[in-house]
Amino acid sequence: MATSMNDELTQATNLQQLGNEVKRSGRPLLLLFTQEHCDYCHRLKEEIFLPMNRNAAERERVLIREVSIDLGNEITYFDGTVEEGYLFFKKYGLFVTPTVILLDSTGTQIGKPLLGANTLEMYGWYLDVAIDDARQTILANQK
């Protein structure tokens, strides 16, 4: 059976390219930081992020990418340097997975990160508010 392209989240590997897409589209970049052995990471992906990624209206609203911080996963920064995903995670002062941050086209974080997943029942609401705020910030900065 063939799998849909929306059965998995796309890994963020090149933030320079993603920054250009954010600038062109006006959508914020949502990065979901995960680890292989993180049960809450898998649960959030299944219950929140994969359904969002399958929804065309959500894909027009926000650019969703996953960043695995497991060893061996490299990422190209907005400035072209390449490092481990874990170091990128630490660069933003993050310390727990799952964590979501929203970025503009230059890699500037918009708003506060969503840390962990303790209140899964309310997570969608917190996420919607964060995305809406990020979109408004990007729109205001484009003027």
Image (cartoon, grey):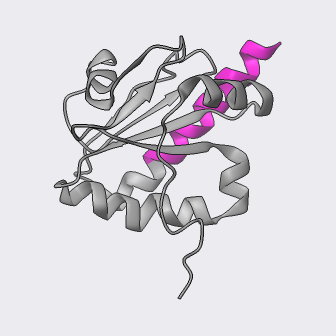
- Please say if 142 is above or below 134: above
Which residue shows up at 59% across the image and 31% down it? Answer: 133
Residue 58 image offset from top left, x and y in percent:
66, 54
Whether residue 111 sits left or right of residue 87 in the image: it is right
- At a point 72% along the width and 13% down the height, the residue shown is 141
Residue under the image location 62 percent in, 38 percent down:
132
In the image, 23: left or right of 102?
Answer: right
Q: Magenta region, mostly helix, strand or loop?
A: helix
Magenta stretch: residue 124 in it? no
Left or right of 19 in this view: 128: left
The furthest residue to the bottom: 1
- In the picture as drawn, the residue positioned furthest to the left comes out as 37
Q: Position of residue 109 (x, y in %)?
A: 48, 20
Residue 84, by quadrant, is top left
Q: Nearer the viewer, residue 27 or 70?
A: 70
Q: How many marks?
A: 0
The stretch in magenta equals: 126-143
Q: Quadrant of the C terminus?
A: top right
Q: In the picture provided, is 108 more to the left or to the right than 66? A: right
Nearest the eye: 7 or 51: 7
Q: 34 or 2: nearer the eye?
A: 2
Picture layout, residue 116 above or below residue 86: below
Q: Residue furthest right?
A: 143
Residue 15 in percent (x, y) is at 54, 26
Q: Residue at x 50, y 44 (%)?
A: 65
Q: Does 141 lie within the magenta span?
A: yes
Q: Is residue 90 above or below residue 101?
A: above
